[in-house]
Image (tube, helix red, strand yellow):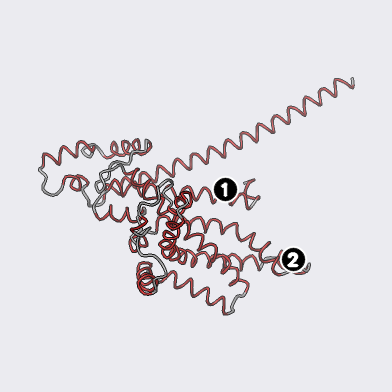
C-alpha cells in the first residue's frame, strides 16, 4: 500500500508542477501578445497620422514634382502614376504596404530614395544628440541631486535659474550668440558643418558617425577637427536637456529624501553620502530613466533649429529643406523615423524601469 500511495503523490506533484509551468507560460504569452498588439496599434496610429497630415496640408505633391508651368495632361498623368487619383482609403493601404516594405518614395529635392537619404543624414543627428544627452544627463543629474540636498540654499537657486533660462531662451538665438562668441570672436571651436574643408574627404564613412569613423581609421587630426565642430552644438543641446533633467531629478530626490527609509537609515548611523547616492538616488532613478529616454528622443527629433543654425547635415536640416521645397515624401519618411525613435526609446525605458524596480515585473 505504501508504494502505490508514494507513486500517486509523485504523479500529483508532477501534475501540479506542469500546471503551474503551463500557467506561467500562458501568462507570459498573454503579456507578449499585449505588447505586440500595443506596438502594432501604435505604429498603425503613427502611419495614419503621417498619411493624413500629408493629405490635408495645402501642398500639392504633383505640383512640387512637375513645376508650375506643367500642362494639365502632364499633371494628370503624374497624379495617376502616384496613385493620387484613387480613393483616400485605398491610398492609405497602398501607403502602409510601401512603408512596411521600406519604400518611403523618392525625394523631390535629391532625386534619391527617401530611406537612402535618411540613412545618410540620421547618423549625424544621432552623433549630435548622443553627445548632447551625455552632457545633459551627466551634469543634470548631479546638479539636481545637489539642489535637492541643499534645498533653499544658493546652489538650489542657481540650478533653478539655469533651468528657467533653458526653458525660456530660444535655442536659435542662443546658438547664434554662441557662434559669434566662441567661433567668430574667440576661435575656440570650429564653425558650422561637421568638418573643415581640408578634412572633408579624409575619413571614409562607415557608420556615418564621424568621431567613430575617424577613430576607426586612425585619423586623429580629423577626429580632433570633428570634435571642435561638434562640441558647441552638442553643448547647446546638452544645456537644454540639462534644464529639464536637473529639474526632474531635484523633484524626485526631494520626494525620496522625505521617505521613512531615509529617516531609518540616518537613525542607523549610515553616512549621508551613502544615503543620498546609494539609496535615495537609486530609487529616484526608476522614474528618471523615462525622463532621460524622452529627453534623448526629444534631442533626436527636436534638433531642427540647432542643425539649421550650425549647418549640421543631419535629419533636422534635411527635414527643414524638405518642408521648404514641399518634398512631402521626405517629410513623411522623416516623421515616421522620428516616431519610431520615440516608440523604441519608450519601450527601452519600460524595460529599464522593470529592471530597476522588481515590483513592476509581477504586475
Does residue 318 sit above or below 163 in this rendering?
Answer: above
Circle 2/circle 1 CB separation < 8 Å: no
Name the N-terminal-most of marks 2 and 1: 2
**Which residue appears at 37% of the width and 56% of the height?**
199
Does residue 225 sit above or below 55 in this rendering?
Answer: below
**Which residue appears at 33% of the width and 58% of the height?**
197
Spot occupied by residue 291 in the image (x, y as percentages of width and height): 52, 59
For the N terminus, the quadrant is top right
Does residue 127 sit above or below 28 in this rendering?
Answer: below
Q: How far apart are marks 2 and 1 (CA)?
A: 29 Å
| 169 vs 361, nearest the viewer | 169
Judged left or right of residue 285, residue 3 is: right
Tell me the crowding category of disc 2: few under 14, some 14 to 19, or many 20 or more residues within 10 angstroms, Cα based.
some
Spot occupied by residue 304 in the image (x, y as percentages of width and height): 36, 59
Query: What number of labels is visible?
Result: 2
Tell me the crowding category of disc 1: few under 14, some 14 to 19, or many 20 or more residues within 10 angstroms, Cα based.
few
Mark number, residue 265: 2
Spot occupied by residue 193 in the image (x, y as percentages of width and height): 35, 59
Spot occupied by residue 298 in the image (x, y as percentages of width and height): 44, 57
Task: Give the structural element (helix, strand or loop) at label 1.
Answer: helix
| 17 vs 219, nearest the viewer | 219
**Which residue appears at 63% of the width and 52% of the height?**
357
Residue wearing tag 1: 351
Q: Residue furthest bottom?
A: 154
Task: Give the structural element (helix, strand or loop) at label 2.
Answer: helix
Amino acid at each position: 500500500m505504501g508504494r502505490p500511495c508514494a507513486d500517486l503523490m509523485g504523479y500529483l506533484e508532477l501534475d501540479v508542477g506542469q500546471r503551474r509551468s503551463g500557467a506561467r507560460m500562458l501568462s507570459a504569452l498573454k503579456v507578449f501578445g499585449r505588447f505586440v498588439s500595443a506596438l502594432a496599434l501604435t505604429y498603425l496610429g503613427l502611419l495614419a497620422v503621417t498619411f493624413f497630415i500629408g493629405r490635408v496640408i495645402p501642398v500639392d505633391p504633383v505640383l512640387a514634382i512637375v513645376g508650375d508651368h506643367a500642362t494639365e495632361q502632364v499633371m494628370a498623368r503624374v497624379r495617376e502614376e502616384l496613385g493620387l487619383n484613387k480613393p483616400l482609403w485605398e491610398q492609405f493601404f497602398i501607403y502602409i504596404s510601401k512603408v512596411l516594405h521600406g519604400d518611403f518614395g523618392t525625394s523631390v529635392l535629391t532625386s534619391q530614395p527617401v530611406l537612402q537619404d535618411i540613412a545618410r543624414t540620421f547618423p549625424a543627428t544621432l552623433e549630435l544628440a548622443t553627445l548632447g544627452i551625455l552632457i545633459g544627463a551627466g551634469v543634470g543629474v548631479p546638479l539636481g541631486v545637489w539642489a535637492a540636498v541643499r534645498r533653499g540654499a544658493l546652489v538650489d537657486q542657481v540650478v533653478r535659474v539655469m533651468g528657467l533660462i533653458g526653458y525660456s531662451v530660444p535655442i536659435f538665438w542662443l546658438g547664434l550668440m554662441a557662434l559669434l562668441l566662441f567661433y567668430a570672436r574667440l576661435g575656440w571651436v570650429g564653425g558650422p558643418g561637421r568638418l573643415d574643408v581640408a578634412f572633408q574627404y579624409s575619413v571614409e564613412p562607415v557608420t556615418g558617425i564621424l568621431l567613430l569613423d575617424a577613430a576607426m581609421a586612425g585619423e586623429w587630426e580629423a577626429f580632433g577637427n570633428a570634435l571642435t565642430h561638434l562640441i558647441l552644438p552638442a553643448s547647446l543641446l546638452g544645456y537644454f536637456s540639462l534644464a529639464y533633467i536637473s529639474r526632474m531629478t531635484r523633484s524626485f530626490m526631494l520626494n525620496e529624501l522625505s521617505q521613512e527609509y531615509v529617516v531609518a537609515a540616518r537613525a542607523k548611523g549610515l553616512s549621508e553620502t551613502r544615503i543620498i547616492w546609494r539609496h535615495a538616488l537609486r530609487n529616484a532613478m526608476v522614474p528618471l530613466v523615462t525622463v532621460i529616454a524622452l529627453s534623448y528622443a526629444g534631442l533626436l527629433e527636436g534638433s531642427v533649429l540647432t542643425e539649421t543654425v550650425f549647418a549640421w547635415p543631419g535629419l533636422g536640416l534635411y527635414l527643414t529643406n524638405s518642408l521648404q521645397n514641399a518634398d512631402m515624401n521626405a517629410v513623411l519618411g522623416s516623421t515616421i523615423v522620428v516616431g519610431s525613435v520615440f516608440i523604441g526609446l519608450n519601450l527601452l525605458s519600460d524595460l529599464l524601469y522593470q529592471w530597476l524596480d522588481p515590483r513592476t515585473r509581477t504586475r
